[in-house]
Structure formats: C-alpha cells, structure tokens
Image (cartoon, rainbow, N blue to C red):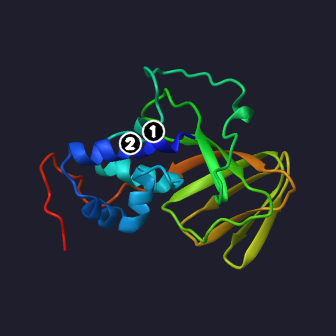
Amino acid sequence: MDLGRIGRRLTELREAHGVSATVLAEKIGISRGYLSRLENGRQIPSISVLDAVAESFDVELEYFFASGPTGRVVVDRNVGDAAGVIPKDATFAYEAICRQRNRKLIHPVMAIFAPHLRTSVASHNVEYFRYIIEGSLTLHYAGQSYAIDVGDTIYYDATIAHQVECTSDVPCKALTLFAKLAPLSEPQFEHTVLEEQL
C-alpha cells in the first residue's frame, strides 16, 4: 500500500474540484485531522472512507490504486504476497486487487492484520466477505466473537459497530471482498469552488 500516492491523489482530486479539506471531511463524516493525516500519507485510510471520497467526486475507487489502463478481464498473480508490510503503530494494512478493472460491483483487497492487535471500533455502510489465507482472526460483533482460521470464511454487515482482532503469532492475511450497501444520498460536489464552512 502506497500511502503517499493515495494521499497525493486524494489532495489532487479535492483541489481540482475546489473543495476545502474542512468541507470534504464534514461531508464524508470524518475529522479534519484524520483527513489531513490521509493526505499527508500518515494514516491508513479505511476502504469505506476512500470510497466515500471517490463517490463524492464521481470517480471510481480504483482512482486511488490503479496504475495503468483498465480492462474487462484482469488477472492478478501471487495475490498472497500483497499487503506485505504493516506500517508502524498500525493494526492493519491492505492492497487493492484487480485494480485495473473499473466499475466493479465488488471490490477485492488483500487485508493484513498485525499479530495480537485489535482494530478500532468501526462501522461502515458496506458488507465484508473475508477468506483467511494465513494466521487467524476474531471478529467482535454485536456482543459476540467469531473466531476464524486458515481456510475459513466470514461474511458480515459492517454497519454494526465491530472490531477485528488478529489472534495469531503471525500477521493474518485475509482475501476480502467489499460491497457497498447503498449509494450516498447527498449530491456530489459540483465542479465549482465551495466556500469553507465555519
């Protein structure tokens, strides 16, 4: 995951539309500080946050990841090697898969979770499917815990507050499919400068 590239593309997209960081952060429901860390490449963005930004500006999620031409059929090889390093002080990292295919209904990523750590409590307007390739994890969800190991799968509605905990001594790698439940109800940003809200 190239946090610097994601941050630069986010900043370029926002500035090209003349939208202030304060306005964008408020629109997608994150703090101004969190957005600043994303743009400076100091924070791993959640996929749902990137997707909300992409939808606000009417671009594909792949805008942040794609590095070449797109096609109808895309082959990715050795995806188990994706998402190699988890940044210091992070609980997870991920790498987009099949980045060269636009207009996907489902967004595949390789997620990797740091050993013996839990993610922050989160909720997103998406559903997740995870298939464990290496290690093990536990989903903490609505007062229940669901432990899964290599070869196991889990599917859940992420609108409910949840945490993911890597319970193995090695990082847990999970092939993850992400699907949005519904489009944002607010209108997209227009191609005009918006005044910063105080």
Task: Give the amino acid type for the residue marked by disc 2 in the picture.
Answer: Arg
Task: Give the amino acid type for the residue marked by disc 1 in the picture.
Answer: Arg
Residue under numbered circle 2: 8
Q: Could you tell me if the residues under marks 1 and 2 are in contact, i.e. CB atoms within 8 Å?
A: yes
Measured as percent of width and height from the top left, residue 159 is found at 53, 67
Give the quarter of the image for residue 25. bottom left
Q: Going 53% across and 21% down the picture, which residue do you hit?
A: 73
Which of 1/165 is in front? 1
Question: Quick one: label 1, few (<14), some, or many (20+) residues within 10 Å?
Answer: some
Residue under numbered circle 1: 5
Give the quarter of the image for residue 13. top left
Q: Secondary structure at mark 2?
A: helix
Which of 4/134 is in front? 4
Q: Secondary structure at mark 1?
A: helix
Measured as percent of width and height from the top left, residue 80 is found at 74, 34
Determine if residue 30 is in view: no
Q: Going 50% across and 54% down the picture, which residue do you hit?
A: 42
Q: Going 48% across and 36% down the picture, which residue do you hit?
A: 65
Q: Going 66% across and 40% down the picture, which residue do you hit?
A: 83
The answer to whether residue 133 is above or below residue 149 is: above
Label 1 and label 2: CA atoms lie apart by 5 Å
The answer to whether residue 138 is above or below residue 2 is: below
